[in-house]
Image: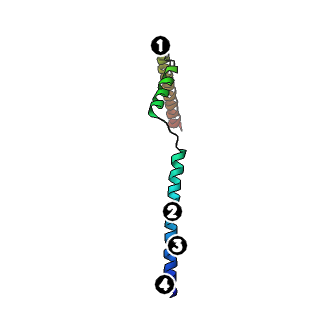
Amino acid sequence: MSKEKEKKTKNLEKDNKKSLKKENKKVDKKKVKDNKPKVKKEGFFKGVKQEFKKVRWPNRKEMVKYSIATIVFVLFFGIFFYLIEVLMYFLNKLV
């Protein structure tokens, strides 16, 4: 008899847990749906378009100036690190 009672109580506990999980899932889904911000695609693309209008694009003269500055910067540091490497090589040979 005691084994049957234990089985019945276990089955009841399982059923209770399942029903609680289902109820929690239903509540969670409702909460998630309510918390999601509703953003329309059209609104997003309108915002992107407005932001692009605010951007100040460089003219040809500025682009040439910035390109030359970038090339000089890269060459300078390339040569700088190459010379450091050569210096370290010779110092390593002396030791």
Q: Which circle marks residue 59 in the picture?
A: 1
Percent across and percent down for residue 89 are 49, 34
Q: Is residue 31 above or below residue 45?
A: below
Quick one: label 1, few (<14), some, or many (20+) residues within 10 Å? few
| SS type, badge 1 | loop
The mark that comes first in sequence, 1 or 2, is: 2
The image position of residue 74, as x and y in percent, is 48, 24
The image position of residue 92, as x and y in percent, is 52, 37
How packed is label 4: few (under 14 Cα within 10 Å), some, or many (20 or more)?
few
10 Å crowding of disc 2: few (<14), some (14-19), many (20+): few
Q: Are marks 2 and 4 in contact (CB under 8 Å)?
A: no
User: Callout 2, which amino acid?
Assistant: Lys
Given this view, does label 3 or label 1 mark the residue nearer the observer?
Answer: 3
At label 4, which amino acid type do we have?
Glu
Q: Nearer the viewer, residue 10 or 56?
A: 10
| Alpha carbon distance from label 4 to label 1 | 87 Å
Disc 3 or 2, which lies upstream in sequence?
Answer: 3
| Cα distance in 3D space between marks 2 and 4 | 26 Å
Q: Residues within 10 Å of mark 3 (few under 14, many from 20)?
A: few
Q: Which mark is residue 21?
A: 2
- The structure residue drawn at horizontal position 50% and vertical position 57%, both measured from the top left corner, is 25
Q: CA distance from mark 3 to mark 2?
A: 12 Å
Question: Which residue is the site of mark 3?
Answer: 13
Q: Which residue is mark 4?
A: 4
* Residue at 51%, 22% in the rendered image: 73
Q: Amino acid at mark 1?
A: Asn
Query: Decide: marks 1, 2 in contact (CB < 8 A)?
Result: no
Q: Check if mark 3's residue and mark 1's residue have beta carbons within 8 Å.
A: no
State the residue at coordinates (49%, 16%). Answer: 58
